[in-house]
Amino acid sequence: MFKINYISINLTFLLIGYLVGSISFGIIISKLKGKDLRKEGSNNAGATNAMRVMGLKFGALVFILDFLKSYLVIMLAFTLKALTKNIYIIPMIAGLGAVIGHIFPIFHNLKGGKGVSCFIGMIFAFDFMIFTIYAMVFVFIVLVSKYVSLASTITSATVPFLGFVPSIYSNSTLSFLQENTIYPIHTIILIIASIAIVIKHIPNYIRLFNHKENKLKL
């Protein structure tokens, strides 16, 4: 019975995360403005292309809303876990669902963004120290290279591994929530999400190799 409950409750949160992640604010907001991010700019429904097509204000709005998708479903899972003593919930799995939904939204013909904003929301919920390191490295790479895709993939592929550093997870957000016993599981889930993001960025690397990738105009 424990195994059935364990699997079913976490699959439920994965599904909830996926459905929430499938709400593509980039597509919704762009259509309200008479545009479609999937047909303009880089043809991507994420925050970077939203900024490119609709301007900084709307790009920031899309980023915040996409960020909140993963953050809020993880916090929902944390809250339910705190209220229930006998249900073994892995909160970060809800964030993984949100990232997958953001990339492959069921409400938008499976054509969404690249998952970075949702992934950052996962990291923020996961560990503030790792989030800070991620943000600093991300900004540094963008300022030096002007390529958001490069910053997104390098930080997403490397920074999550900091979750295995004992001195970090012993003082983490999860630690005071008494989640440090399954911290490595959360880290592995974060790494799985990062792999999905890197794979989604393969076309960007092809364009980088061919010197055709769009630079961010600061």
Image (cartoon, grey):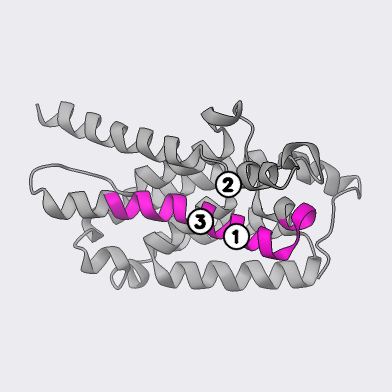
Taking the magenta stretch, the answer to whether it contains residue 132 is no
Q: Disc 1 designates what residue?
A: 61
Residue 153 at what x, y percent from top left?
A: 65, 53
Distance in Å between CA atoms under marks 2 and 3? 11 Å
Magenta range is: 51-76
Tell me: 103 left or right of 44: left
**The one of 117 and 63 positioned closer to us in this rendering:** 63
Amino acid beneath label 2: Phe
Q: Which residue is drawn at 19% across and 49% down?
A: 80
Q: Residue at x 65, y 56 (%)?
A: 152
**The one of 177 and 110 positioned closer to us in this rendering:** 110
Disc number placed over residue 25 in the picture, else none: 2
Amino acid beneath label 1: Leu
Tell me: 52 left or right of 64: right
Residue 169 at what x, y percent from top left?
A: 33, 66
Residue 21 at what x, y percent from top left?
A: 48, 41
Main SS category, magenta section: helix
**The one of 186 and 81 positioned closer to us in this rendering:** 81
Taking the magenta stretch, the answer to whether it contains residue 61 is yes
Q: Residue at x 91, y 45 (%)?
A: 210
Amino acid beneath label 3: Phe
Residue 81 at what x, y percent from top left?
A: 18, 50
